[in-house]
Amino acid sequence: MTHSKRIGIFLMAGIISTFALELGDRRSTRGAHDLISSAEAIVGRPLTPVSVAGVARRTTRRRVVATSVYVATLPPACTTIVIEGVTVQQCGGQYYQASGTQYVVVNIVE
């Protein structure tokens, strides 16, 4: 096969596929699965990449990091809170996590 014949076949295949994609786009019905579907994300909805709610949710991830400091009892007036699925005790500005019969001091990292 000559070089010019290969180029001709390649160009013809490109033209046919472009035509098929355009024809498919015009004949598509709502809800049908196309070869290339259109994106229907609306900016401002919670799960779109540039929405304010999505950005706020992604930037407020916190994690609980245990230290090597243990206490036998908690200070008075502690409240129980859950951070990223981890139950901790908040006593003033300090956080504690239960560890057996003791409590370990934890840091909350954003």
Image (cartoon, helix red, strand yellow):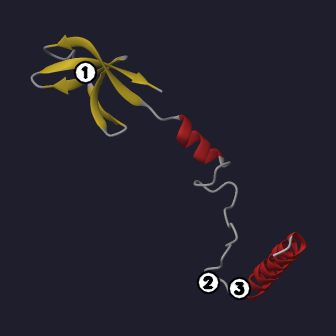
Of the 4 image quadrants, the one containing the N terminus is bottom right
Q: Secondary structure at mark 3?
A: loop
Q: Which residue is mark 2?
A: 32
The residue at 86%/76% (across/down) is 5
**Farthest residue, direction left:** 101
Query: Horizontally, is 108 left or right of 79 in the view?
Result: right
The numbered dot on residue 77 is 1
Q: Which residue is mark 3?
A: 28
Q: Nearer the viewer, mark 2 or mark 1?
A: 2
Measure the C-alpha gap from mark 2 to mark 1.
59 Å
Determine whether label 3 and label 2 are within 8 Å by CB. Answer: yes
Which amino acid type corresponds to the residue marked 1 in the rendered image? Answer: Ala
Which amino acid type corresponds to the residue marked 2 in the rendered image? Answer: Ala
Quarter-of-image position of residue 81: top left
The residue at 16%/24% (across/down) is 99
Measure the C-alpha gap from mark 3 to mark 1.
63 Å
Residue 28 % position (x, y): 71, 85
